[in-house]
Every structure is written in structure tokens, then in C-alpha cells.
């Protein structure tokens, strides 16, 4: 194919559409960019959790300062995700923080903690993230820091924070303050019909009968997938075997005690048939329950969600009558992705191209990553099959890799207190690798390597999430008892003489960060002083 991209149409608004529009007008201001969105799409405004890459996108790529962005989106800063009860009920939870770890022993990395754990078995798994990432201490105390004096070592506020914000306000903010002022054309209309031909989408018929035509279409129409799924009928790849949750209940709640409830991290708690999230934004808290409809009815799931909101699993439990007065929204999804996100002259981004599940806040990652990658290809005057194939391979890598990673949170659980968790324990998650025709190797390859090598922390990236998840779920990657015994026998290596040295040094770091964190402002006070006060705008 040979596709022009001077006249581009984005179908669908919301977070995805306006992020795409803002990025395109930022890097290609001379192109004709039009966004068409329906006036009838309902919005569920309960908060959005992101990875740290979103901050790079907003500050770095779009050049928007947090003092403008956060008030415009009702946002707060985030530095970690905490997972509770995924390993087993009452496990105390563990943090998966943003940012690179701090290694103090020359030539050694994560294995130093494993040595400490071996000789001091009472060391809790929560100590792992605290030991290597200073901002975990801040998160656990509900504090923020600009780290101006480097008291938190290698913590970099410019890149080691993510966001919680209102998903609705994100789209509105970018629309009114970025995309439209820079020249993006905005059409509010239902699309009555999509005309297709051998080259893809030929034209769109709007609700007033107007026919519009463009060179290239970006489908941001959400689960509807108006162009890719409906008009071009691209096949869908189902991920339900790996990711069973296909439904969610959601509701916003008002703050009862902002100092307890506004936390600089997303709190995820495993429940009977899935998991619940607690995502504080500036004006309120976003809550939800992601669950499997094969294991529980919508009505029973709602009852489980309400029970969670009145329990000690949330920072400030609600009363039953308070819960009954909340607005609850139900969302259905289908974990997976379209076999090709780019077909002919249509490229789907966000929910229109696929969806995994809310865990890890990857929803907007499947917007920002694809649009930035697409921008690289737009340096060519026209798209050809080379660009299409490259982008489809890129998208497959994204979906498969993140699918693999998300399954770690389930496959390493030992819970068996419901049929949901029993079924999860009975699954074969490595089915892709056990079939002869499969050629895919994603995050599981990293997982395999980590368990097959000695001192494998040298093989893993500094910020590998697998390390935090595995340690939090009581799985070893480094020097377990078998390796220590083998090295002691073969090489005469005895770690007992250094284990105490490691413990003293690592405990000292944690204590030093705790002392520094006590002097910092609470999340609410920091945001009020530096972000939300009128004279700071």
C-alpha cells in the first residue's frame, strides 16, 4: 500500500483521542488533523492510574508543566503500586515502585538482599523494595519530596513519579488547552455510516448526512472499535485464558480523612473473584472491582465490592448506608487485542485496538506508546507496507509482553479460598511456549532465564518489575538455599561473614530514608502548597 498522511482523522475523543490529537499537532503542526467524537458517549469519572511513563509523555513530549496539568486534570502524583492479598490472605502486601534501585555494594545487586534473607529469615518480603528504592519509604508515609538535597539518593522526581487523575478531565484539558488551540479541528457528531473500499475506509457519513473523507484514520472509538473491528472486521485475539477478569464495578467516593486516604500510590487488593483498586485524585477517590464474570454474577460482585468498601481493606471504611447511596457503574471488556492494529488506512489506538485489564495502569500506555511509535514512521512522506508491518509487530510485542507480565500477579498466588483462585492455580500459563508452532517469546523468557541462572539479578534490568513481583510473592530469583550450598561446597564461599555487613548497611539506608521522609510534607499539604494554591499557578 501507499498511504498519504497529510489529512488525518481521529475517530473518538476521550483520553485516547485527545492524547493522539495533541501528540500529532505537537510534532506535525502543518498537517490537517481532525477529531470526530460522538456527543452521546457516556463517561465514567472515577479516576485513572498511570505508569511513570505518562509523566515523561506529558512533561517531556507535550511540554506541559505539572503546575498546569495537575489542577487541569484533578490530579496527584504517584510513585508506586501496592499489591495486597495477591500472594495469600493477610500477606501484608508489597510495593512495586517507580524508578531505578540503589545498589551500594560494588559488583552486586539484588542478590545482597537474598543473602540477608537467607541468614536472617525473619526479614519480611516488604523489606525488599524498601531496601533498594528510597521513594518506597516516602510512599509508605504518604509523603512527597523534590529530593533537592539528594537525601533520597537516586530518586528523580522529574521521572520517578506517575499520575492519578480524572480520565474525563484529561481529555477535556488537552482538548481545550492544547490540541484545539494548536489547530486540531473538532467535529461533534455521530458517525452514521463507514464507507469502505479495497483501500480501507473511503469516507464517513455524519449524523447530518455530511460525507467526510481523509487520507489516514486513527480509531480511538474505545471498545466499540468502529473502524477496525466493525468496518474492517479484523479478527480478535482472546487473552481470557491468561487474564480472566472481563468485568468491573466502579464508583467515586468523597474524602472522609484526606490525610489517610490520599496516598501517593495505587492500592490494589485481591478479593474473592478478582481485585479492587483504590486510586485517590485531588477531589475524591476512584474505586473499582475488576472481576471474572465466569466466576461471579454482576449482582454478587457488586455485593462483594460494597463489602470491601466497608472493610478495613480501605484506609477509611464507609458505613453501609453510605455505600448504598453511591453511584455504581458496570463496565464489560474482553481481554485481548485485534490481530492487526493497523489494517489498510486505519490504525487503532487504545481500547479500539485491544485491552488487557486495569492492573498496572496500562490503559493509557497503549495510547502513548503507539502514538509515539507512529510519529517515527510519519517522517516518511507516505506509509507503505513496511510501516504497517513494523507497527503491527510493535503492537503485538506490546500486547503479548504486557499480557505475560500481568499474569505474574496471578500465577504466583497460592490462594485457594474461592473457585476463582483455585482455577487460577490450575492454569498452565506457559501454553504459548509448550506448543510447537508458537514462536513468541516475551516476558516469560526473562522469567525462565531468571530461574535457570545463578545470581540472576545480574541478568535483569535495573527496573525490572519481575523482581518486585517475585520477591513480593515469595519467589526467589537470586541466591536461594540450594545455590548457597553449592557455592559453599564447590568454591568454599561462605556468605555468613558478609551477611551481617549487608544487613547493617541496608538497614542503615532504610532508617536514613525514614528520618528524611518524616521531615517532608504529606501528599495533600505538598500539592496544596506547590500545585493547587492559586498564586502558584
Image (cartoon, rainbow, N blue to C red):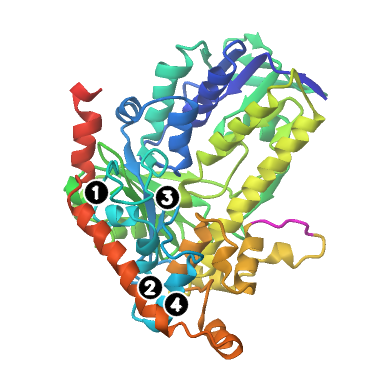
* Quadrant of the image containing the C terminus: top left
SS state under label 2: helix
Residue 163 within the segment the image draws in magenta: no
Q: Give the range drawn in magenta.
A: 438-442
* Quadrant of the image containing the N terminus: top right
Could you tell me how far apart the alpha carbons at marks 1 and 4 are, in whole angstroms? 30 Å
In the rendered view, does 408 fall on the left or right side of 83? right
Say whether disc 1 or disc 3 marks the residue closer to the N-terminus: 3
In the rendered image, residue 505, in percent from the top left (x then y), is placed at 33, 69
Give the residue number, with chain letter if any, for mark 4.
115
Q: Which of the 4 quarters of the picture holds residue 395?
A: top right
Residue at 23% across, 49% down: 261
Q: Can residue 316 be seen in this view?
A: no
In the rendered view, does 282 fall on the left or right side of 492? left
Q: Which of marks 1 and 2 is in front?
A: 2
* Crowd around label 1: few <14 · some 14–19 · many ≥20 (10 Å): many
Say whether disc 2 or disc 4 marks the residue closer to the N-terminus: 4
Residue farthest along the bottom direction in this orientation: 489
SS state under label 4: helix
Residue in front for this viewpoint, 245 or 162: 162
Say whether disc 4 or disc 3 marks the residue closer to the N-terminus: 3
Give the residue number, with chain letter if any, for mark 2.
502
CB under 8 Å between discs 1 and 3: no
CB under 8 Å between discs 2 and 4: yes
In the rendered view, does 274 fall on the left or right side of 21? left
| Magenta portion: prevailing SS class | loop
Give the residue number, with chain letter if any, for mark 1.
143
Give the residue number, with chain letter if any, for mark 3.
98
Q: Nearer the viewer, mark 1 or mark 4?
A: 4
Amino acid at each position: 500500500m501507499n498511504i498519504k498522511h497529510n489529512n488525518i482523522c481521529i475517530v473518538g475523543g476521550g483520553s485516547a483521542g485527545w492524547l493522539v490529537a495533541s501528540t500529532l499537532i505537537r510534532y506535525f503542526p502543518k498537517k490537517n488533523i481532525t477529531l470526530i467524537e460522538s456527543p452521546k458517549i457516556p463517561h465514567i469519572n472515577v479516576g485513572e492510574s498511570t505508569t511513570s511513563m505518562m509523566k515523561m509523555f506529558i512533561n517531556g513530549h507535550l511540554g506541559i508543566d505539572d503546575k498546569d496539568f495537575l489542577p487541569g486534570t484533578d490530579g496527584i502524583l504517584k510513585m508506586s503500586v501496592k499489591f495486597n492479598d495477591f500472594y495469600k490472605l493477610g500477606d501484608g502486601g508489597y510495593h512495586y515502585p517507580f524508578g531505578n534501585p540503589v545498589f551500594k555494594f560494588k559488583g552486586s545487586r539484588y542478590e545482597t538482599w537474598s543473602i540477608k534473607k537467607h541468614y536472617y529469615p525473619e526479614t519480611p518480603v516488604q523489606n525488599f523494595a524498601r531496601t533498594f528504592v528510597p521513594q518506597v519509604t516516602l510512599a509508605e508515609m504518604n509523603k512527597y519530596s523534590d529530593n533537592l538535597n539528594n537525601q533520597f539518593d537516586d530518586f528523580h522526581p522529574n521521572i520517578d513519579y506517575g499520575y492519578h487523575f480524572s480520565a474525563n478531565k484529561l481529555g477535556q484539558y488537552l482538548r481545550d488547552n492544547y490540541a484545539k488551540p494548536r489547530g486540531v479541528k473538532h467535529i461533534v457528531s455521530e458517525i452514521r455510516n463507514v464507507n469502505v473500499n479495497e483501500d480501507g475506509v473511503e469516507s464517513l457519513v455524519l449524523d447530518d448526512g455530511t460525507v467526510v473523507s481523509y487520507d489516514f484514520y486513527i480509531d480511538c472509538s474505545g471498545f466499540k472499535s468502529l473502524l477496525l473491528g466493525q468496518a474492517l472486521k479484523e479478527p480478535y485475539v482472546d487473552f481470557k485464558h491468561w487474564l480472566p477478569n472481563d468485568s468491573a464495578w466502579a464508583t467515586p467516593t468523597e474524602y472522609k480523612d484526606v490525610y489517610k486516604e490520599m496516598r501517593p500510590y495505587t492500592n490494589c487488593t485481591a478479593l474473592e473473584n478478582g481485585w479492587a483498586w483504590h486510586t485517590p485524585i485531588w477531589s475524591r477517590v476512584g474505586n473499582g472491582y475488576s472481576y471474572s464474570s465466569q466466576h461471579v454474577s454482576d449482582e454478587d460482585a457488586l455485593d462483594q465490592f460494597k463489602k470491601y468498601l466497608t472493610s478495613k481493606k480501605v484506609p477509611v471504611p464507609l458505613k453501609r448506608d453510605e455505600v448504598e447511596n453511591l453511584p455504581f457503574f458496570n463496565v464489560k471488556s474482553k481481554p485481548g487485542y485485534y490481530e492487526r492494529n493497523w489494517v489498510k488506512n486505519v490504525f487503532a489506538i487504545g481500547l479500539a485496538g485491544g485491552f488487557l485489564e486495569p492492573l498496572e495502569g496500562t490503559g493509557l500506555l497503549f495510547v502513548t506508546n503507539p502514538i509515539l511509535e507512529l510519529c517515527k514512521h510519519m517522517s516518511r512522506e507516505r506509509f507503505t507496507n513496511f510501516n504497517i508491518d513494523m507497527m503491527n509487530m510493535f503492537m503485538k510485542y506490546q500486547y503479548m509482553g504486557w499480557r505475560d507480565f500481568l499474569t505474574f500477579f496471578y500465577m504466583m498466588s497460592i490462594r485457594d479460598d474461592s473457585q476463582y483462585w483455585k482455577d487460577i492455580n490450575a492454569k498452565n500459563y506457559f501454553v504459548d511456549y509448550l506448543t510447537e508452532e508458537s514462536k513468541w517469546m516475551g516476558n516469560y523468557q526473562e522469567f525462565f532465564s531468571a530461574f535457570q541462572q545463578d545470581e540472576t539479578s545480574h541478568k535483569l534490568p535495573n527496573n525490572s518489575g519481575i523482581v518486585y513481583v517475585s520477591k513480593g510473592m515469595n519467589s526467589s530469583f537470586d541466591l536461594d538455599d540450594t545455590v548457597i550450598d553449592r557455592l559453599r561446597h564447590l568454591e568454599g564461599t561462605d556468605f555468613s561473614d558478609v551477611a551481617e555487613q549487608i544487613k547493617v548497611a541496608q538497614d542503615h539506608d532504610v532508617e536514613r530514608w525514614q528520618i528524611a521522609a518524616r521531615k517532608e510534607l504529606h501528599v495533600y499539604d505538598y500539592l496544596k502548597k506547590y500545585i493547587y494554591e492559586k498564586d502558584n499557578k
